[in-house]
Amino acid sequence: MAGNIGAFNNGLANIGLANTGSVNLGIGNISPHFAVDPARPIMGNFGLFNNGLQNFGIANTGIGNGGFPIGNLAGLGIGNNGNFNQGLFNFGNHNLGIGLVGDNLIGIGPLHIKR
């Protein structure tokens, strides 16, 4: 696997600016340092200022956070905190929407249903 491409990257296979960890693409992403194995591919983060693994968007913290599961909106994951949230500013796990606090919720803020 290649080294880093860009400036101020620390880790392995980072592309961009000021990424730390392994296999990050973007600016200011932080992921764990792990061995890169082509037989078992794993991604650090993609976007800006994400912290964790497999986050896609801006300022997500946790694992597998991203945008809405609709075409080009997949990159719109912003400010999610937890695991596997999709949307904007969700706190918890497995949420889909905007401003949700809790687990397994779909909706916008207080207007939500539980999956």
Image (cartoon, grey):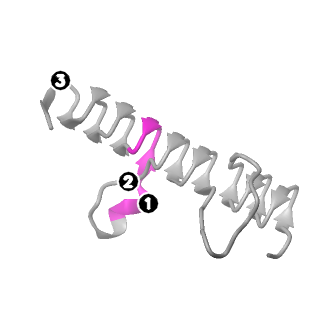
Residue 75 position in % (x across, y down): 43, 60
Residue 46 at x, y = what percent?
58, 59
Q: Quadrant of the N terminus?
A: bottom right
SS class, disc 1:
helix
Q: Which residue is mark 2?
A: 67
- Examine the rendered structure and indicate whether residue 79 appears above or below residue 28: above
Relative to 16, is 86 above or below? above
Residue at image position (70%, 55%) is 27
Give, as a three-letter code, the residue at label 2: Gly
Query: Pointers 2 and 3 in contact (CB under 8 A)?
Result: no
Which label is found at residue 75?
1
- Which residues are the magenta region? 73-84
Q: What's the residue at 39%, 35% (across, down)?
A: 89
Asked if residue 62 lies left or right of residue 27, the reply is left
Instruction: Give the residue type at disc 3.
Output: Pro
Mark 2 crowdedness (10 Å alpha carbons): few <14, some 14-19, many ≥20: many
Question: Could you say whether the residue bearing mark 2 is in a helix, strand or loop?
Answer: loop
Identify the residue at image location x=51%, y=44%.
63
Upstream in the sequence, badge 3 or badge 1?
1
Q: Amino acid at mark 1?
A: Gly
